[in-house]
Amino acid sequence: MRRGFSLVEVMVVVAIAGVMASLSVGLGSAFVQRQRAQEDIERVRSLLVGARNHARRNAACVKVNRTSNKVLTAVLFTDASLGCPAAPQAVPPSSGLVELRASTSMTPLLVLGVEVSSLIFLPDGSLALSEPATIGVTDTDGRTTPLFIWPAAGVVKQGKPT
């Protein structure tokens, strides 16, 4: 009686293991990219909610700018015509106003499909806009998930990927 495996049998098992390993690596990298995009969506939403909350809590105006396709900043803003009080010279580190650098790209800030340079949260937490605004986070597969910001309440809600 013969013991062991033939070279052909070992080669078949190694080939099957190689195919399965290559498939799992591909699926794993797609999963990581989706997770990274989801984290960016949550970070953008958190920045917008934080800017709104800071405006309400401190009776101040906060401007959110998209400075590049991967960077959002939130800063204190002064404009007497909008009822925004004079902002202090320095923003305290505890203010929560930060620069967000995303790993995926973000679409421009849009109001009814028209690009705007910034979103301004007023002291009552509402937006200085009459129509809803959107910003989309686009993953590496080209899927864009929109975040909708409603003017009256400044509420940020995530939409479905397009």
Image (cartoon, rainbow, N blue to C red):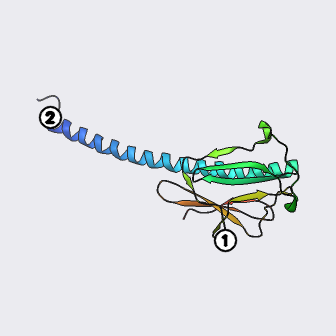
User: Is residue 15 found left or right of 42 in the rendered image?
Assistant: left
**Of the residues under marks 2 and 1, which one precedes in the sequence?**
2
State the image coordinates of residue 108 (x, y, percent, origin top left). Answer: 61, 60
Categorize mark 2 by other alpha carbons within 10 Å: few (<14), some (14-19), many (20+): few
Callout in the foreground (2, 1): 1
Q: Pick the residue in front: 57 or 22.
A: 57
Residue 137, placed above or below residue 21: below
The structure residue drawn at horizontal position 74% and vertical position 52%, both measured from the top left corner, is 49
Q: Which residue is mark 1?
A: 112
Q: Which amino acid is tagged 1? A: Leu
Residue 99 vertical placement versus 158 (above, below): above
The residue to which callout 2 is attached is 7
- Residue 79: give x, y in percent of width and height: 83, 57
| Dots 2, 1 in contact, CB < 8 A | no
Q: Quadrant of the N terminus?
A: top left
Q: Amino acid at mark 2?
A: Leu
Residue 127's label in the rendered image is none
The residue drawn where x is 15% and y is 38% is 8
39 sits left or right of 129 in the view: left
Query: Between marks 2 and 1, how big is the CA–CA gap?
Result: 66 Å
